[in-house]
Amino acid sequence: MGGIGWREGAQAAVEGGFLGFGGERVTAAERALIDQVKLAFDASADEPIKAGVVAVGSSTEALPLAGCKVIITAGPTHEPIVRDHYIAKPDSAEQGYRFAEAAVALGAETVLVSGPVNLPLPPGAQLMLAETALHMLKISEHELPCDIAICAAQVSEWRLSQPIQEGGSTDNPAEKLELELVPTPDIVATIAKRTDKRPTLVVGCITEKENAIENGRKNLSTRGCDFIVVRDVSPAAESFTSDRDTVHLISDDNVETWPSLEKRDIADRLMKQLAAQLLTRQQKRGP
């Protein structure tokens, strides 16, 4: 599947063309089961089914997130100024999209709330398009409840306090334009501090140039989430010019450092850890 333009993606989402089932919504778990049945019938009767494929009626060990719902935010937000000008933080959205791929692979019903980017939709995920921080938060909260929320989007920290009226001073680009800015909502903190429909696990994602672990711990405390994924771009981590990233996974009682991993490997490792955490919490709650 090739890259999908922002406007084309919006139209395809309306028409249901992403899923290829005539617009019907099919969850990741249902899609995984369909694929498993197909592979099982295609396999030779005297050959074992390949690793990772679960026979119908067997346990869901290979799909630990089957029956779970995961919401992932990804990409930048564009806070409009006037016409084709906006406030944004750069974000390729690749890590967020990799998270979605990994969630689908583990059997989760996956909702990807994406800002404006030009990336192919991870197969099996449901795409929800958002342009501003307020819009992204509204969509994310509308999709609750869920089991896991991963806020990987690089949300703009500022927006205009009031929209600029077209036809005013901006018609003359030589004139000075004064902007009054206000903070955008902190999406991960808003979701993590909910008193109702709070996800079982809330994960925040930040990028730090220095004091990565210390700043990650502060974010964990002030935002109220269960985990913080810190992308370490300090000179020692050498992440700026590499296709690989060093990240720190921080929780209340632990810090794990994963050096020099591709984004796909980071996503796979994180989703497996979150699946294990869900299972542990379910076992503690009991039947």
Image (tube, rainbow, N blue to C red):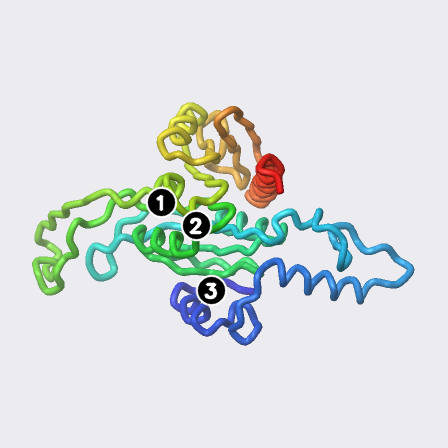
Q: Nearer the viewer, residue 35 or 278?
A: 278
Q: Which mark is residue 157?
A: none
Residue drawn 62% across the image and 52% down it: 66
Q: Which mark is residue 4?
A: 3
Q: Which mark is residue 187?
A: 1
Q: Disc 1 or disc 3, which is closer to the eye?
A: 1
Disc 3 marks a residue whose amino acid type is: Ile
How far apart are the two marked residues, 1 and 2, measured between alpha carbons?
9 Å
Q: Disc 1 or disc 2, which is closer to the eye?
A: 1
Q: Where is 75 relative to 120, above or below?
A: above
How far apart are the two marked residues, 3 and 2, measured between alpha carbons?
17 Å
Q: Is residue 262 at all visible to an observer of this figure?
A: no
Residue lying furthest right: 46
Disc 1 marks a residue whose amino acid type is: Ile
10 Å neighbourhood of mark 2: few (<14), some, or many (≥20)?
many
Residue lying furthest front: 287
Considering the numbered disc 2 on the image, is that residue within a helix, a strand or a loop? strand
Q: Quadrant of the C terminus?
A: top right
Q: Is residue 174 at all visible to an observer of this figure?
A: yes
Q: Where is 44 relative to 242, above or below?
A: below
How far apart are the two marked residues, 1 and 3, measured between alpha carbons?
25 Å
Residue 34 image offset from top left, x and y in percent: 68, 65
10 Å neighbourhood of mark 3: few (<14), some, or many (≥20)?
some
Residue occupied by mark 2 = 73
Q: Nearer the viewer, residue 183 or 116?
A: 183
